[in-house]
Image (cartoon, helix red, strand yellow):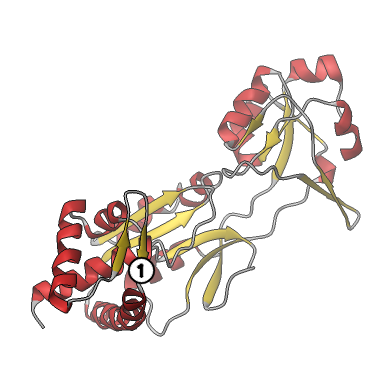
Amino acid sequence: MRTTDLSELAAFDAVARHKSFRRASEERGVTASAISHAISSLETRVGIRLLNRTTRSVSLTEAGAMLLARLQPAFGDIGFALEGLNQFRDTPFGKVRINAPNSIAPFIFSHVIGPLLIENPNLEVEIVATDRLVDIVAEGFDAGVRLGTSLQDGMTAVRIKPRLRFAVVGSPAYFKNHGKPRTPADLKDHACIQNMYPSGARYPWSFTRDGKSIDVQPAGPLSLDDHELMVQAAVSGIALAYVWEKRAEADLKAGKLARCLDSWIEPEDWLYLYYPTRKYISAGLKAVIEAMRV
């Protein structure tokens, strides 16, 4: 097989997985026009249309779907073969791509990445932080981070540091004017920042005490999907915020914020690094796992 043949197949594999020429070009490190040329060359060579293209979408033809199903195991085997060479290296080598929720990424990686890269100078780590739901396989990630072990089949989960906790916080001025809620039920009488996923869906404030769990869907004038903005809004005194405790840590120490309902909040489930279960794990990913695990 010619090198150009393999390059064209790799370009097709990337476009088929991402359903996007732009994202395929970013993964491959080439221009979108180069990816388009490779796909056109492949289709001309095999004499079959493999992709349906419009200005807004890319989809597989029946022939393209069949080719992708055959290619993915083959590319997996090639990847395993190359990764197997890492056993002959003194240090891990290559790129590891990790997806993590934006709201907690700083707490996970802040004390890990520096020492990891110093110890492994041939390792490159790429972290994409987003709170949207990500299919790590479809989007070309080696691993992802999430709370709990509820995963799709074919995934392995490793418990990692740290264990996080939520906090309900407000400014001293807010509590002076409105008082502090003593139970979650009291939140109905308070202005609260509504926590929002990137999709726009709201999620409740969760409390646990004496083995009983309570979810409260608060009301308030502001809805946000970013915990940093929630903290800033709470500091301004407009409402209470339900945020990761570490996000508010500096303002709590500075006296700009105070807690409430603390006895109703327990630590969350552990964080887990998850990745596709496979026979071989790259030396780079192994190094990341060892640096992050509990």
Q: Is residue 155 left or right of residue 53?
A: right
Name the residue at 71% across, 45% down. 203
Residue 31 shows in this picture: no
Label 1, residues with CA under 10 Å away: few <14, some 14-19, many ≥20? some
Question: Is the N terminus in the top left, top right, bottom left or bottom right quadrant?
Answer: bottom left
Q: Quadrant of residue 242?
A: top right
Where is residue 287 shown, x and y percent of the image?
A: 38, 67
Q: Mark 1 sits on what residue?
A: 60
Q: Nearer the viewer, residue 119 or 123?
A: 123
Name the residue at 71% across, 34% down. 194
Question: Is the C terminus in the top left, top right, bottom left or bottom right quadrant?
Answer: bottom right
Residue 157 shows in this picture: yes
Q: Is residue 180 left or right of residue 19?
A: right
Q: Nearer the viewer, residue 59 or 284?
A: 59
Name the residue at 58% across, 29% down. 229
Where is residue 16 shown, x and y percent of the image?
A: 34, 66
Q: Secondary structure at mark 1?
A: strand
Residue kind at label 1, given as amino acid type: Leu
